Image (cartoon, rainbow, N blue to C red):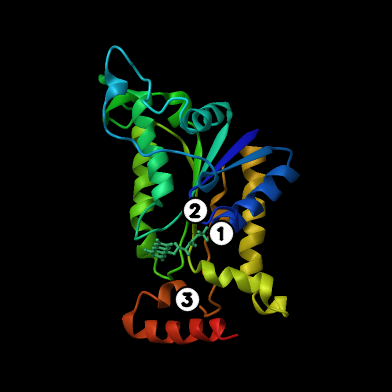
Amino acid sequence: MHILSINGSHRGEKGWTHALLSRLKTGAASAGASFEMITLAKVKINRCLGCRKCQTVEQHLECVYAEKDDAAAVFAQMKAADLLIFATPIYMMTLSGLMKTLFDRFYSTMDVNDMRLSAHGLIHHHINPAISSKPFVSLICWSNLESASAANAAHYFRTYARFMEAPHVGELFRNGTPLLDYAHDHPDQTRFPRIHRVYQAYEQAGRELAARGRISSQTQRHANQELISLPAFGLLKRFVPIKRIVIRETQKMFDG
Ligand SMILES: Cc1cc2nc3c(=O)[nH]c(=O)nc-3n(C[C@H](O)[C@H](O)[C@H](O)COP(=O)(O)O)c2cc1C
């Protein structure tokens, strides 16, 4: 099993997205998979110009940036992988710019004159399935505690799976990312058992991807659990008056 993760964080390897991917890598490697990481902040992907030269007879499916940036190399790595992990932080309630810029470049891999009907009954243009129809995991992380922050990105990846006919083999959602630092920085590591449980779940998810090519629903539940140690926090935070308590409790964590 060869897994390729694509990290859309503009902070690259200094970010929480990378920290989470590293746990997946640890688990996957321990179960015998090779795990490659592309950090988009470290490569050059120009934004699609929308020039449509890639749709002309003269330059069919060839981007004006061919050999001028790293998109073709990234596509080649995607083709070589058995499974992809699209990992993006939430920026202004949606995918990061780096991640979206990469997806926009798929345009040069699709023939807009070649219309297809997907298995889900969606009319779409023919996109190179060797790049876009791979089984994939979406990993979305954000600092807010609200699930609503990730709704657009979650919907994006679900729609992507339907149009591309790509098996969506795992959905990882990590809110409250600044809290993850407590697992590293705080002298008393046992004070934040949930954070350790989340990291353990990420390692387990990596093992499952290596062995079975998908993340079990139980592991996903553990990975996506709330970090705040309030009983039934996920449920409680839906009620506006309770949110004041949530803010107070979270603030306590920040204040140490
Ligand atoms: C430009 C920008 C926009 C952001 N927008 C949001 C947002 O809408 N909602 C949210 O919860 N967090 C937002 N964040 C916070 C990031 O999603 C969060 O810190 C994430 O974990 C960053 O991952 P990283 O450390 O891998 O870069 C934003 C951060 C940046 C830099």
Name the image quarter holding the C terminus: bottom right
Residue 9 shows which numbered tag? 2
Residue that mark 1 sits on: 15
Observer-nearest of 39 and 173: 39
Using a 10 Å C-alpha cutoff, classify the residue at mark 3 as few (fewer than 14 neighbours), some (14 to 19) or many (20 or more). Answer: some
Q: CA distance from mark 3 to mark 2?
A: 28 Å
Q: Horizontal placement of 223 versus 50: left or right? A: right
Q: Which residue is mark 3?
A: 233
Q: Is residue 68 above or below residue 254?
A: above
**Amino acid under disc 3:** Phe
Mark 1 CB lies closer than 8 A to ligand 1: yes
Amino acid type, callout 1: Gly
Tell me residue 105's x, y (percent): 38, 34
Q: Secondary structure at mark 1?
A: loop
The residues bearing labels 1 and 3 have C-alpha atoms spaced at a distance of 26 Å
Q: Quadrant of residue 163?
A: top left
Q: CA distance from mark 1 to mark 2?
A: 7 Å
Q: Is residue 166 left or right of residue 123?
A: right
Crowd around label 1: few <14 · some 14–19 · many ≥20 (10 Å): some
Q: Kindly identify the residue that appears in the image at 50 percent across and 39 percent down.
A: 136
Q: Is mark 2 within 8 Å of ligand 1?
A: yes
- Figure quarter occupied by ligand 1: bottom left
Please give the label number shown on residue 104. Answer: none
Task: Give the residue furthest to the front.
Answer: 68
Residue 63 visible at all: yes
Kindly tell me whether mark 3's CB lies below 8 Å from ligand 1.
no
Q: Earlier in the sequence, mark 1 or mark 2?
A: 2
Q: Who's the residue at 40% across and 76% down the image?
A: 237
Q: Amino acid at mark 2?
A: Ser
